[in-house]
Amino acid sequence: MSGFDWDILLPALAAGLLILSTHVPFGMRVLQRGVIFADIAVAQIAGLGVVMAGLAGLEQQPWLVQGVAVASALCGAAVLAWLERAATEVKEAGIGLAFVLAATLGILLMSRDVHAGEHLKDMLVGQILWVSNTQLLATGLLSAVVLLAWRVLRARQGHFVFYALFALVVTASVQLAGIYLVFASLIVPALATHKLKRWRLQVAYAVGIAGYVLGLLVSVWLDLPAGAAIVWMLVLSGAPVLLRPARA
C-alpha cells in the first residue's frame, strides 16, 4: 500500500464520490421511468459537445468548452423529454437512435484528427486518475446545486426539468470518468438494489463506493485502465446484492 501514489488515487476517489452523489438517485429515477439508455445518450451528446469545442479551438478556454458541452446536453435533454412525452411507445428506440447519431457524428467530426483515437478513448473510458483540483471543485459545486434543485423541484419535475438536471450532472461527470463509467455509475447501484424495500439508497451508495475503491486499487495493482476496472468492480460489488435470496 505504501507504494501507491495517493496524490493520484485520492483525487480519483473524490471524483468517484462526487459522481455517485448525483448518479445514484438519478439512476434510480432513470430505472423507474424506464428510460435506461437516456443516460448513455445524454453522456454521448455531452461528449459530442466537448469534441465540437475542441475542433473549434477552444481547448485553452475551459469555460467555453463547458458552455458548449452543457448546451449540447441540454439540447439532447429537450429531445429526450419530447420523445418521452410524445412518443411513449417507442421512446427507447428513439433514445437509442439519438445515442447512435451522436456517437457517429463524433466519429465523423474526428475523422481527420490525427489524435482521434486517443480522443475517442478518453471520451469512452475517461481519465479519472488525472482529474485536476479545478475539475473537482467545479463538479462539487455543480453537484451541490443540482442536488438542491432535485430536492426543491422534486414534486414539480416534468419531463424537461428531469432531463435538464440530468444533462447537467452527466456533462460534468463524462469529462471526469468517460461515457462507460458514467453509465455504470448510474445503472449498476440502482439495478443492484431495485428489489430492496429498506435502506435502498444507503446500500446503493455502498455498492458504488465499493466499486470505485476496488476498481482504483485493481487498476493500480494490475496496471489496468482505471475506468474499465471500476466498471467491472461496480458490477461485482452489486452482484451479491442483486442475487441475494429474497426473504420469505
Image (spheres, rainbow, N blue to C red):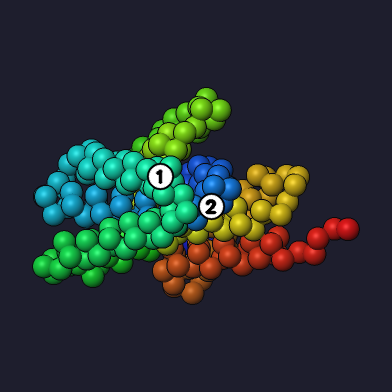
Residue behind mark 1: 86
> Mark 1, residues whose alpha carbon is within 10 Å: few (<14), some, or many (≥20)?
few
38, above or below 3, in the image: above
123, above or below 74, in the image: below
Viewer-nearest residue: 152 or 234:
152
Camera sees residue 49: yes
Label 2 vs label 1, nearer the camera: 1
If the image is split into quadrants, where does the C terminus sit? bottom right
Where disc 1 sits, the SS reads helix
The mark total stands at 2
- Residue 10 placement (x, y as % from top left): 48, 51
> What's the residue at 24%, 49% (across, down)?
49
Camera sees residue 182: no
Label 2, label 1: how far apart the Cα atoms are? 15 Å
Viewer-nearest residue: 91 or 247:
91
Dot 2 amino acid type: Gly
Q: Which mark is residue 34?
A: 2
> Mark 2, residues whose alpha carbon is within 10 Å: few (<14), some, or many (≥20)?
few
- Residue 102 placement (x, y as % from top left): 28, 58
> What's the residue at 41%, 69% (across, down)?
225
In the drawing, does residue 197 fall left or right of residue 47?
A: right
